[in-house]
């Protein structure tokens, strides 16, 4: 009986991460980011969103999967959010999918991205390129108007 | 037990709980207030310098733009100006200030950067938009003065300070600094330390308060025990002593209650039954009086004091309470065992106007006089104190008598006993007097009832002996009779005094001892032996008031007195009442045979004198010959 209780205690410690969020690493920022991306993606696409985040972390996967169907491959996704510094050439093209970045400078430099969500002075900032939205025939709701920049 | 106590007396639970809750709430709110004011103060101290420096930067930027009439346009167009602004902003960056930047609001209402102290990747591009996190930012355009915004949502920033840079009375540019969370953390640490200090003080105060409350409750409980008579559950004498000065006599009528013949109950059934009867009587009283209005105190063995509260419409209700107590006790049976009961009656003295007395003790004394009168009227009755009736007859209290002894206000008056044949002085009878505080002479009928059976009576006897001894020493030609009560005859101290006096020459033979006839003497061998001893010492023994009580010729043979004094009430009737005449005649006849001399008391006129003379009574005493008076020197 003593051995059984000991085993039970050890097992409960081993799998503790599975049944209590308190011991899980957790980020408010990722949660907020996921919510905003979800709103943007929903406003930009009218089909079911399949999100691809390159080199997605375990925690991001856990948080984003609450809002999206995550796609393991870029080719299967219709919305790509690049939030890390990666070799962008290795990814699929933007012919039939939307690309979103977390870097304002990348947004300015690369026509592939139609918008960016980035942290500016520790505040979340959203910018859409008006020309690129028009090129993709994306019509955002009026509430997004303040985020659209003319370039 | 404790649970029961709290259920029975919810007061003891609710009041402390409310009190503690109130104290806690007060402590909590005062802590919050103190914290708030300290936080403000600490914040002001910590940030005032930063704000001053930032203001200086804003003044500097404005000075750079003094030639401009379109600040955003000119900054965007002039790289050198941008450089100067950025440098100025960089001076503001410290470990506590994370960002410093200059912004303006474009025609779409969007904030855009015109300068930024951040370096490399974080640095905003000129014209880059800034999404603000709170609509509070817009207030600066209406207030036209610096604005502090605190952040709760942002993880990295604690607060933002905005300084307007004005152009023609409107806000054209905004110099913004973002405080890192580190600054507020430092402030919070200081506040936390102060909070802990305050909290510690509060906890200590609370503990002290709690201890005080517990102690107060314990004191209350102990005091209640100290003031409650364990047997009867009414207040005890301690309560009376403690609170008599605080009882407002205007609010009460006062009654003293005495259980009739309670000594007989104790003697017949034992003290356990006596206690049980006391309990039952007290219980009846408590059931009859009004809760929280009337006060019941057991101030003696079987004596209770009732303070019945007067209502607005007079003291009738209060008197009704006393009458109800009287009749309830009269109507109820009091159990001496499981199935046996006895009837109990009480005597009650009532003082309807205790407020007229100067002190509680005085009011109590008058109530006690009423009780005394109730007992004198045969008990089982209520007597209300009548000021007029009792003014003349008021007895002295024990304390007054004690004071008189201590203050040497005891004295003797002397009445002559004369030889019937010659009407010449034979003896004096010493009669007790007390001078009261007003200088009036108080007679024994107002002294003895209060001290009967107490040690004070013994002390009075000693005083009288001392006075008479002194008189006999001064005047060797006189003989003085002293009244002793039967208890004096068996009192060692008094016997010792008499033995001492007998040592002096010519004292015992001139000191007659008048003892009231009582059965106790003949039944007490010590008393008889002591009388014989006193006779041998030379004292003459007189039996006082013979014929009034235990009149028995056998008594005379037992005691063998030298004199008998026929009771004055018989002598007074000797002219009119044949039986009294025959009684006196027979007493005289027997006394002559037994060689005992006879004294007739209360000889108040010549007719009585002639009558007793005809009966050959040897000595006479009464107003016909003299009234009691101090002895002439």
Image (spheres, helix red, strand yellow):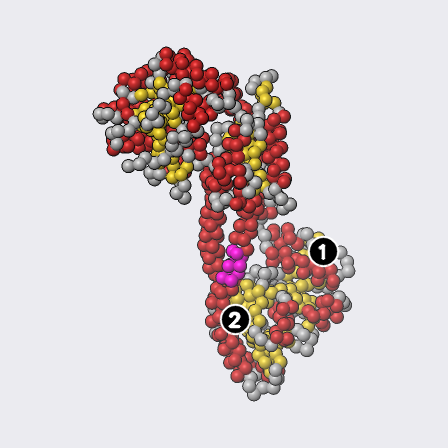
Q: Secondary structure at mark 2?
A: loop
Please identify the quadrant where the N terminus of chain B is shown: top right
- Residue B623 pos. (x, y %): 41, 31
Quadrant position of residue A28:
bottom right
Q: CA distance from mark 1 to mark 2?
A: 37 Å
| Residue B110 spot, x, y in % from top left | 66, 73
Which subunit holds the residue at mark 2? B
Q: Mark 1 or mark 2: which is in front?
A: 2
Q: Residue at x 27, y 30 (%)?
A: B472
Q: Is residue B488 visible?
A: no
Q: Considering depth in this image, is B117 or B626 the residue closer to the camera?
A: B626
Residue beneath the point at 61% across and 33% down: B323
Residue B483 image point, x, y percent = 36, 26
Q: In the image, is residue A11 above or below residue B458?
A: below
Viewer-closest of B290 and B614: B614
Q: Secondary structure at mark 1?
A: strand
Magenta stretch: includes residue B358: no
Q: What are the residue bounds of the magenta stretch?
A: B30-39
Image side of residue B350 versus residue B400, left or right: right
Residue drawn 30% across and 18% down?
A: B535
Q: Is residue A19 left or right of residue B473?
A: right
Residue A50 numbered mark, or none: 1
């Amino acid at each position: 009986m003593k051995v059984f209780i000991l085993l039970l205690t050890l097992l409960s410690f081993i799998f503790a991460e599975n049944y209590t969020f308190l011991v899980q690493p957790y980020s408010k920022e990722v949660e907020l980011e996921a919510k905003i991306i979800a709103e943007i993606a929903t406003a930009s696409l009218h089909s079911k969103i399949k999100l691809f985040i390159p080199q997605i972390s375990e925690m991001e996967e856990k948080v984003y999967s609450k809002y999206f169907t995550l796609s393991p491959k870029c080719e299967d996704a219709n919305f790509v959010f690049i939030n890390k510094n990666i070799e962008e050439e290795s990814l699929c093209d933007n012919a039939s999918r939307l690309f979103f970045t977390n870097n304002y400078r990348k947004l300015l430099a690369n026509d592939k991205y139609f918008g960016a969500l980035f942290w500016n002075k520790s505040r979340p900032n959203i910018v859409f390129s008006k020309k690129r939205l028009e090129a993709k025939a994306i019509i955002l709701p009026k509430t997004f108007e303040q985020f659209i920049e003319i370039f | 037990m404790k649970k029961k106590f709290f259920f029975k007396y919810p007061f003891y639970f609710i009041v402390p709980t409310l009190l503690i809750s109130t104290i806690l709430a007060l402590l909590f709110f005062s802590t919050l207030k103190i914290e708030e004011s300290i936080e403000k103060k600490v914040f002001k101290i910590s940030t005032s310098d930063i704000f001053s420096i930032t203001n200086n930067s804003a003044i500097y930027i404005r000075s750079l733009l003094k030639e401009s009439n379109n600040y955003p346009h000119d900054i965007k167009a002039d790289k050198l100006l941008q450089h100067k602004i950025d440098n100025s902003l960089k001076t503001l960056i410290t470990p506590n200030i994370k960002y410093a930047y200059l912004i303006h609001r474009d025609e779409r209402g969007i904030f855009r950067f015109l300068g930024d102290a951040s370096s490399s990747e974080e640095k905003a591009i000129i014209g880059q938009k800034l999404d603000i996190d709170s609509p509070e930012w817009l207030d600066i355009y209406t207030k036209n003065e610096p604005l502090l915004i605190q952040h709760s949502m942002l993880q990295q920033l604690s607060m933002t300070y905005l300084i307007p840079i004005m152009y023609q009375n409107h806000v054209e540019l905004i110099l913004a600094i973002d405080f890192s969370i580190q600054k507020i953390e430092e402030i919070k640490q200081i506040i936390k330390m102060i909070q802990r200090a305050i909290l510690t003080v509060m906890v200590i105060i609370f503990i002290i308060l709690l201890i005080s409350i517990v102690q107060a409750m314990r004191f209350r409980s102990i005091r209640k025990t100290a003031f409650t008579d364990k047997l009867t559950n009414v207040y005890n004498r301690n309560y009376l002593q403690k609170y008599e000065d605080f009882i407002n006599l205007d609010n009460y009528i006062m009654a003293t209650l005495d259980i009739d013949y309670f000594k007989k109950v104790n003697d017949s059934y034992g003290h356990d039954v006596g206690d049980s009867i006391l309990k039952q009587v007290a219980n009846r009283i408590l059931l009859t009086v009004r809760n929280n209005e009337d006060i019941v105190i057991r101030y003696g063995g079987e004596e209770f004091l009732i303070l019945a509260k007067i209502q607005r419409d007079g003291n009738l209700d209060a008197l009704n309470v006393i009458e109800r107590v009287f009749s309830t006790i009269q109507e109820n049976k009091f159990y001496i065992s499981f199935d046996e009961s006895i009837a109990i009656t009480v005597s009650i003295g009532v003082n309807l106007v205790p407020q007229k007395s100067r002190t509680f003790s005085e009011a109590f004394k008058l109530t006690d006089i009423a009780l005394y009168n109730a007992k004198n009227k045969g008990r089982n009755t209520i007597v209300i104190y009548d000021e007029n009736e009792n003014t003349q007859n008021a007895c002295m209290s024990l304390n007054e008598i004690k004071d008189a002894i201590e203050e040497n206000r005891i004295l003797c008056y002397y009445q002559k006993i004369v030889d019937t044949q010659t009407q010449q002085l034979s003896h004096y009878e010493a009669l007790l007097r007390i001078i009261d505080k007003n200088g009036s002479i108080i007679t024994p009928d107002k002294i003895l009832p209060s001290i009967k059976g107490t040690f004070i009576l013994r002390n009075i006897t000693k005083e009288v002996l001392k006075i008479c001894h002194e008189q006999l020493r001064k005047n060797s030609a006189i003989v003085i009779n002293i009244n002793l009560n039967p208890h004096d005859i068996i009192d060692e101290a008094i016997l010792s005094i008499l033995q001492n006096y007998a040592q002096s020459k010519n004292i015992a033979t001139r000191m007659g001892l008048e003892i009231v006839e009582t059965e106790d003497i003949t039944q007490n061998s010590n008393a008889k032996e002591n009388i014989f001893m006193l006779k041998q010492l030379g004292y003459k023994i007189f039996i006082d008031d013979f014929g009034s009580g235990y009149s028995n010729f056998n008594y005379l043979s037992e005691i063998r007195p030298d004199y008998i004094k026929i009771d004055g009430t018989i002598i007074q009737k000797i002219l009119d009442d044949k039986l009294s005449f025959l009684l006196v005649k027979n007493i005289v006849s027997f006394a002559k045979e037994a060689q005992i001399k006879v004294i007739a008391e209360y000889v108040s006129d010549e007719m009585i004198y002639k009558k007793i003379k005809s009966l050959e009574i040897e000595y006479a005493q009464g107003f016909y010959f003299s009234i009691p008076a101090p002895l002439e020197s």
